[in-house]
Image (tube, rainbow, N blue to C red):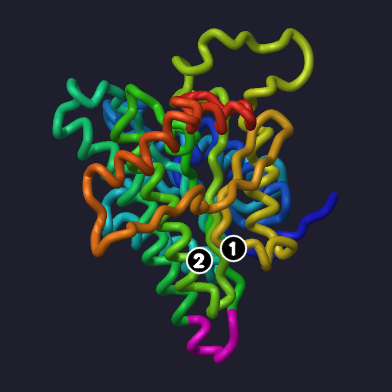
């Protein structure tokens, strides 16, 4: 069995269940020592008491299979606890090489019904949680590169969503956070490239506690691997964390059910110049209205359907 991550140390956040668990197991299978982070709250909305059990169970599962794993049960949305998570990896295994950000919650509501707390809490866990761990990992890698005078091995894999790509009417907080994570990733990729670090972002689709409503109508097959199983996503995370992906940086990839799609950055579709010193309302009306009238009204969703993307 190939072990390209042998001797590497990885952190996976939100790894007590679902996607994070599958990703932690895959990185361990590829040879990495894994710090399994999960705050352990039972509610997918972040409700309930924190519980160390999910993270510890996954860590035990990795060790039972012959790997090395340590559990961390802190909240990555807390700046100090995120610092402690990164330091735990360094203290336990000597250094950090791979960071997979996966932790998140859902508090779905239409924009006209959403409360301030529902907005703030989702942005806090997803976006600040990604920022916190990335911040401390980036400092570790920069310091190591300065000490050695050479690039280091560093990999960041962040988690966005098709809710950002195709829209999701009942998830304005989640879609906004996931879109912001893409921006965080591309900025990080540019900032850390000179240190030997890559940062990429995935939009996974999988049947987990977070998506039980989205995929409620899709029955699991009687035989074979569920097309929505998290195990379809984990190999891409392993690849992006590995040495073969050293030149893959600042990329957005959609992954599910045996499919990987590389998403291009936004491109200019059309360009219009004013014939005067500045545009007037009437001139814009004459230029833009015919352009949009000639295009499908739901062009964003039409483009998404090419990839088989759904909301959520």
Label 1: state its secondary structure: loop
* Disc 2 target residue: 189
The span from disc 1 to disc 2 (Cα, nearest Å) is: 6 Å
Overall secondary structure of the magenta section: helix
Q: Nearer the viewer, residue 168 or 161?
A: 168
What's the mark number on residue 249?
1
The outermost residue toward the right is 1
Residue located at (74% from left, 62% from top): 244
Q: Residues within 10 Å of mark 2 (few under 14, many from 20)?
A: many
Q: Residues within 10 Å of mark 1 (few under 14, many from 20)?
A: many
Residue located at (47% from left, 23% from top): 211
Residue located at (21% from left, 31% from top): 118
Query: From the viewer's perspective, is residue 298 above or below residue 2?
Result: above
Label 2: state its secondary structure: helix
Pointers 1 and 2 in contact (CB under 8 A)? yes
Q: Nearer the viewer, residue 288 or 301?
A: 288
Q: Is residue 106 magenta?
A: no
Q: Can you tell which quarter of the image residue 41 is in?
A: top left
Residue 232 locus on image (x, y percent)? 68, 33
The answer to whether 284 appears left or right of 304 in the picture is: left
Query: From the viewer's perspective, is residue 279 above or below residue 20?
Result: below
Residue located at (49% from left, 73% from top): 192
Residue 176 locus on image (x, y percent)? 33, 40
Residue 100 in view in this figure: yes
Residue 151 locus on image (x, y percent)? 59, 81
Query: From the viewer's perspective, is residue 81 above or below residue 286?
Result: below
Residue 70 locus on image (x, y percent)? 52, 51
The answer to whether 256 appears left or right of 148 in the picture is: right
Residue 71 in view in this figure: no
Magenta segment range?
144-151
Q: Nearer the viewer, residue 41 or 136?
A: 136
């Amino acid at each position: 069995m190939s072990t390209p991550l042998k001797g590497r140390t990885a952190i996976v956040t939100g790894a007590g269940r679902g996607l994070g668990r599958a990703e932690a197991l895959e990185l361990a299978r590829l040879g990495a020592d894994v710090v399994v982070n999960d705050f352990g709250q039972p509610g997918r909305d972040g409700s309930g008491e924190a519980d160390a059990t999910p993270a510890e169970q996954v860590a035990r599962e990795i060790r039972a299979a012959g790997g090395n794993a340590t559990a961390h049960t802190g909240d990555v949305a807390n700046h100090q606890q995120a610092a402690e998570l990164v330091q735990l990896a360094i203290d336990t295994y000597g250094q950090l090489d791979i960071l997979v950000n996966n932790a998140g919650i859902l508090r779905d509501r239409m924009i006209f019904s959403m409360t301030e707390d529902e907005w703030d809490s989702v942005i806090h866990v997803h976006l600040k949680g990604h920022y916190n761990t990335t911040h401390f990992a980036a400092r570790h890698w920069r310091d190591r590169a300065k000490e050695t005078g050479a690039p280091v091995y560093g990999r960041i894999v962040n988690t966005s969503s098709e809710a950002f790509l195709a829209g999701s009417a009942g998830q304005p907080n989640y879609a906004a956070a996931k879109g912001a994570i893409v921006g965080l990733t591309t900025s990080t990729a540019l900032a850390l490239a000179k240190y030997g670090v890559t940062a990429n972002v995935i939009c996974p689709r999988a049947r987990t506690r977070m998506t039980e409503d989205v995929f409620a109508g899709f029955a699991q097959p009687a035989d074979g691997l569920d097309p929505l199983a998290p195990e379809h996503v984990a190999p891409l995370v392993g690849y992006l964390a590995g040495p073969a992906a050293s030149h893959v940086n600042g990329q957005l990839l959609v992954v599910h059910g045996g499919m990987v799609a590389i998403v291009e950055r936004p491109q200019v579709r059309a360009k219009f110049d004013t014939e005067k010193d500045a545009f007037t309302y009437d001139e814009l009306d004459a230029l833009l209205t015919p352009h949009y009238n000639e295009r499908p009204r739901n062009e964003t969703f039409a483009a998404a359907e090419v990839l088989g993307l759904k909301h959520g």
